[in-house]
Image (tube, rainbow, N blue to C red):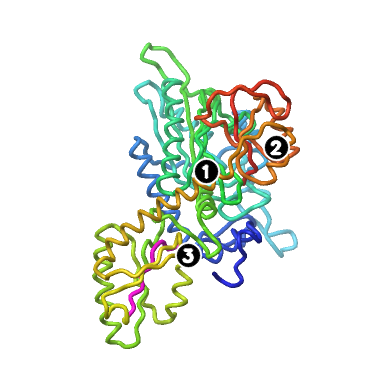
Amino acid sequence: MAKDFVTRQENYSEWYNELVVRADLAENSSVRGCMVIKPYGYAIWEKMQHKLDQMFKNTGHQNAYFPLFIPKSFFEKEAEHVEGFAKECAVVTHHRLAKSPDGKGLIPDPNAELEEALIVRPTSETIIWDTYRRWIKSYRDLPILCNQWANVVRWEMRTRMFLRTAEFLWQEGHTAHATREEAEHEALKMMNVYADFAEKYMAMPVVRGIKSANERFAGAVETYCIEAMMQDGKALQAGTSHFLGQNFAKAFDVKFLSKENKLEYVWATSWGVSTRLMGALIMTHSDDNGLVLPPYLAPIQVVIVPIYKTEEEKAQIDAIADNVMKALRQKDIAVKYDDDEKTKPGWKFNEYEFKGVPVRITLGARDLKEDKVEIFRRDTCEKEIIHKDDIVAECEKLLADIQSNLFKKAIDLRQSKTRNVDTWEDFKKEIEKGGFLMCHWDGTPETEEKIKEETKATIRCIPMDAPAEEGKCIYTGKPSHRRVIFARNY
């Protein structure tokens, strides 16, 4: 561990911010509230993107692209939507700059004001449903299953890299259906796709649930979500899928001629995950020695570091490394051989450990005389001496074991920080300890808002697998029929 690297125990927030920068994932840009995603960080995002894109296409979706700019009037057509996003919108009013009257700077050209202001995309429902109006005429045109990979802008005052920035990367799916049942099925299906991705590839356990009315997406009838717990016990909303009903179809007059020859409004969904998943990945697995990456998303899964004294020893190690790399790549394992002579092996060990590379192999001239090599696993920081002929098999085994171990470790942490709470006095004490509090709630937005005002905790979701259970609301004492998850969140 770097001597000056703050620990999670000392300051979790500072630990996270330092880790993002020092692991070469991202840095703050000159534009307030925005970040630069560096090559190593972007390589992780690309892996996420590739896996998710595959999963979307396997469920019948196609990629498209829609404009970055949205006419202000489009937002005004759906009342809940505009109210939900109005405070976060960046607005373009002019299309040209001119010299200021004193000639010392630039100002928006008074003669170049737009006829209608344009919103820089915070989400694309409105521009897409204006487009779908032209695409949809008959039931034969349905369903439409579109996804786009894009950037969005939501003007945030308090930002933190990956978790909350003014501009971020994401994907947003927008689908159109002939029936309510189809649309609801789609929204649930995509929530499950996100959950499968989070658990299988990110090794991050999630709760599948429904958002309360207060937390629901602006303009949605229902919002399904996956909620994850970070190591400090705070919740992080990792993905959402919205059943939009016919709200946007009615706002943009999107109708179709049904099989029964009746003109009907289309049913809609939208769903998305963003570079916020990068923050989730960091906070779920990383430790006081730096980044820890699940092998399925690591840009470098195995790094090979040589140790030698003579050029003859270097040549022998090069030959072995070359064979190992070929064999690993045949197994579709991403491997790097770091024989850069500008840095010493000790520096390399620290660097790759800090960057979370799952497996490190040390090819030392002395060990190789006995056909031995050292292998190191990042999740437990354990070393082992193995026979050089077993490198490939051991790497395969280790990568699979690390992936499952990280998931188990995260599950165990979540279980240890999840507990039932039945009284308001206990709730106020327990929320200070962090974690998920399973509580009864009377189902009203007013009660949820009061709890939030007094404790900064919100209902993260109503778990879909929560059993029916009679009880009393922790705040009002009114009847409740199941527990919900309360937590403080990112």
Bin the neighbour count of mark 2 within 10 Å (Cα to Cα): few under 14, some 14-19, many 20 and up.
many
The secondary element bearing badge 3 is classed as loop
Front residue of 422/115: it is 422
Sequence-wise first label, 2 or 1: 1
Does residue 92 appear anywhere in the picture? no
Q: Residue at x 45, y 37 (%)?
A: 173
Bin the neighbour count of mark 1 within 10 Å (Cα to Cα): few under 14, some 14-19, many 20 and up.
many
Q: Which residues are magenta?
A: 354-364
Which residue is label 3 attached to? 355
Q: Is residue 60 left or right of residue 108?
A: left
Q: Position of residue 244 (x, y in %)?
A: 52, 27
Q: Position of residue 410 (x, y in %)?
A: 50, 48
The secondary element bearing badge 2 is classed as helix
Bin the neighbour count of mark 3 within 10 Å (Cα to Cα): few under 14, some 14-19, many 20 and up.
many
Sequence-wise first label, 2 or 3: 3
Q: Amino acid type of disc 1?
A: Ala
Q: Amino acid type of disc 3?
A: Lys
Can you tell which mark lies on residue 433?
A: none
Tell me the distance, in whole angstroms, between the alpha carbons under discs 2 and 3.
Answer: 38 Å
Front residue of 256/291: it is 291
Q: Is residue 376 magenta?
A: no
Tell me the distance, in whole angstroms, between the alpha carbons under discs 2 and 1.
Answer: 25 Å
Q: Position of residue 166 (x, y in %)?
A: 61, 50
Instruction: Examine the image and state in which quarter residue 359 appears.
Output: bottom left
Which residue is label 2 attached to? 427
Q: Position of residue 327 (x, y in %)?
A: 24, 64
The secondary element bearing badge 1 is classed as strand
